[in-house]
Image (cartoon, rainbow, N blue to C red):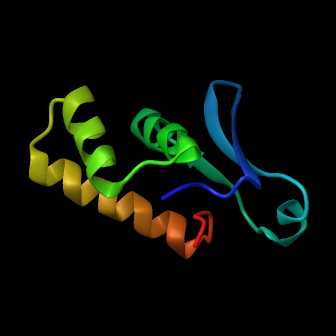
């Protein structure tokens, strides 16, 4: 799974912001800010990662139970899908 190339991650005033570029900038309404774990997931989705890779990434980088990592990753992916930021 991968983030559409029409979205980039920028750090503005210490905040992780997802910015639409090109035509998506005209169509996208709102703003997406990410915490540090969201940024980590977004960066790995920019290059392409599976659901299981993302779960392992969160599990390995944070003091969290595997099931909690799974739940958090699935929730993050759902938000990205709802906002149409993921490639089909």
Q: Is residue 69 above or below residue 44?
A: below
The residue closer to the viewer here, 34 or 66, is 66
Q: Position of residue 20 (x, y in %)?
A: 78, 54
Residue 8: image quadrant is top right
Query: In the rendered view, does 25 fall on the left or right side of 50?
Result: right
Q: Is residue 4 above or below residue 47?
A: below
Query: In the rendered view, does 56 fall on the left or right side of 10?
Result: left
Q: Residue at x 41, y 58 (%)?
A: 76
Q: Residue at x 42, y 62 (%)?
A: 77
Q: How many marks?
A: 0
Quadrant holding the C terminus = bottom right
Q: Position of residue 52 (x, y in %)?
A: 26, 52
Q: Residue at x 90, y 67 (%)?
A: 26
Q: Is residue 6 above or below residue 54?
A: below
Residue 22: image quadrant is bottom right
Q: Position of residue 58 (x, y in %)?
A: 28, 38
């Amino acid at each position: 799974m991968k983030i559409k190339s029409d979205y980039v991650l920028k750090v503005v005033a210490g905040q992780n912001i997802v910015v639409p570029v090109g035509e998506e900038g005209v169509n996208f309404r709102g703003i997406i800010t990410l915490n540090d774990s969201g940024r980590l997931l977004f960066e790995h989705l920019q290059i392409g990662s599976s659901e299981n890779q993302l779960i392992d990434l969160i599990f390995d980088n944070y003091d969290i139970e595997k099931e909690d990592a799974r739940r958090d990753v699935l929730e993050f992916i759902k938000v990205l899908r709802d906002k149409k930021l993921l490639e089909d």
